[in-house]
Amino acid sequence: MAKELCVLAYSGGLDTSVAIRWIAENYDVDVIAVAVDVGEEKDYEGIRKKGEQVGAVEAIVVDAVDEFYDDHILPALAANLMYEGKYPAFTALARPLLAKHQVRIAQEKGATYVAHGCTGKGNDQVRFETTYQALAPELKCIAPAREWGMSREEAIDYAEKHDIPVPVGKDSPYSTDTNLWGRSIECGLIEDPSVEAPEDAWEWTVSPLEAPEQPTYVKIAFERGAPMALDGKQMPGPQLVSTLNQIGGANGVGRVNMMENRLVGIKSRELYETPAATILLAAHKDLESLVLDRETMHFKPYLEMRYAELVYYGLWFTPLREAIDAFMAETQKTVTGEVTVKLYKGTAEPVARTSPYSLYDFGLASYGEADSFDASKAEGFIDIWALPARVTNAVRRKMEQ
């Protein structure tokens, strides 16, 4: 009689590699390992082979790079997605896509279980399991890292005992996650927020101290909010992002070192590398400031903050996220033009911008001879504008007397 199947979200890292054997032993099931390619990780064939080597009855790699860019990164860019003002939430952005493909394969294979390698105090457990329940509540969930009670050091010992190859050791216990939009680094010395992050934690970015002495300029062309070309050369979105990751990283751009409020209610010290996201978000917001009217510009950040929370909290498959996406898409209709960004020793500063939809009127803004603003109307405008304040304070003074 064939065993029941469990489809595991597989990254090739410590926890998911240990999980393959642990789930098979403790649940008496066959494990199918599913890795989803969302960019920047280079050796997915190696990850697939490793999954089979560790004990999966089948290991599958799903190419979802274009889907991640089109359906997740572009909406996030439209919403200027930045959790707590610092984190582009690239891990949170990818998890619903990973879980969606995991559920799809579980349904195709007739699996009983889905599983992930997330810890019991992390955010990703919520993101995976919320997606499972939204898309396939009939599937049972196994969360081995919540159940086995092993510390990270004990998990490394388990891997060594069972000849499970893992990319970490006790001397370098970093846990990393990578996709097209960024790289996260956790564990080890990073967990002490009172000390500076060790330099060996960074891989995508050089230290700003060692970045070139001369600035690098990049010109990014947008069409309806989507980046279309870099320095005059059109290229597919994933290639443009990957190229900016390299250029930005070489200039020390995109290092994030923050104290973060996790969904589960604890604070954690987090390191992220987001060169392309840092550059594109800066350029995109700058272009919006040129083409969006004042009222839209002032209202949009309210929804941007809520959108960032929805993504971070794992609420991707919800009506509110879809509704905010619709609003954001409407605002992007005129976000077309070019922005020049100056990269210098860890900074990404937009320094020039143009657009056929620019709302900037030189005659209205200039104080020189080209000035076309009728200043004579200002006095009447100020009288009407100040009327509520004038009346309110007159009444207050009368009451005080």
Image (tube, helix red, strand yellow):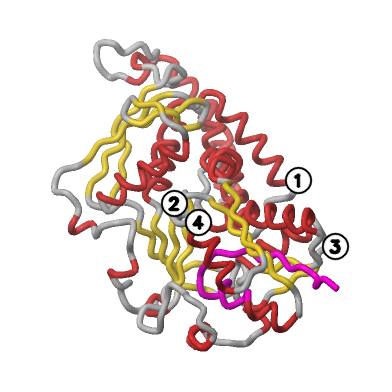
Numbered label attached to residue 40: 2
The amino acid at mark 4 is Tyr
Number of marks in the rendered image: 4
Query: Callout 2: few (<14), some (14-19), or many (20+) C-alpha neighbours within 10 Å?
Result: some
Query: Callout 4: few (<14), some (14-19), or many (20+) C-alpha neighbours within 10 Å?
Result: some
Mark 2: secondary structure: loop
The amino acid at mark 3 is Glu
Query: Callout 3: few (<14), some (14-19), or many (20+) C-alpha neighbours within 10 Å?
Result: few
Give left or right: position of 267 versus 346. Answer: right
Mark 4: secondary structure: helix
Numbered label attached to residue 138: 3
Q: Position of residue 80 (x, y in %)?
A: 51, 43
Mark 3 touches mark 1? (CB < 8 Å): no
Going 62% across and 87% down the picture, which residue do you hit? Answer: 149
Nearer to us: label 1 or label 2: 2
Mark 3: secondary structure: loop
Vertical relation: 133 (above or below) 1: above
Nearer to us: label 1 or label 4: 4
Closer-to-camera residue (313/65):
65
Give the Cα distance between marks 3 and 1: 21 Å
Q: Position of residue 47 (x, y in %)?
A: 51, 62
Specify whether residue 3 is painted magenta. Answer: yes
Residue 120's image quarter? Answer: bottom right
Closer-to-camera residue (381/84):
84
Mark 1: secondary structure: helix
Mark 3 touches mark 2? (CB < 8 Å): no
Q: Which label's residue is closer to the chain start, 3 or 2?
A: 2
First to last magenta residue range: 1-20
Give the Cα distance between marks 1 and 4: 33 Å
